[in-house]
Image (cartoon, rainbow, N blue to C red):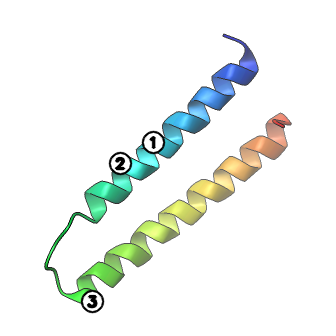
Amino acid sequence: MSTQQSKTARIKRKLIQQKAAWLQAFPLTNAPISTVIGKVELYLSGYKEGIADAIEAVEREGIT
């Protein structure tokens, strides 16, 4: 596997993990809306950091 394929595979795994985390954090529920909003805010703050890390890695590694 080339370095590029390896990097692409890592990014794909990370996205799959993010999706799994989203589904785990927000199952269909009858929870109060304030609880759901709090979970969404917490999740999105982590997602924002993940995106920033991915952008930094792309810039650092020169992935196109």
| Real-space CA distance between mark 2 and mark 1, rounded to the nearest whole angstrom | 6 Å
Q: Is residue 14 left or right of residue 43?
A: right
Q: Is residue 27 left or right of residue 3?
A: left
Residue located 36% across and 53% down the image: 21
Residue furthest to the top in view is: 1
Above or below: residue 40 compared with residue 11: below
Quadrant where the N terminus sits is top right
Task: Give the residue pinned by disc 1.
Answer: 16
Task: Give the residue pinned by disc 2.
Answer: 20
Sequence-wise, the earlier of marks 2 and 3 is: 2
Residue furthest to the front in view is: 28
Which secondary structure lies at badge 2? Answer: helix
For the residues labelled 2 and 1, say whether their Cβ atoms are less than 8 Å apart: yes
> Which kind of residue does numbered mark 3 sit on?
Ser
Q: How many residues crowd around disc 2 within 10 Å: few (fewer than 14), some, or many (20 or more)?
A: few
* Residue 14 horizontal/vertical position (percent): 51, 41
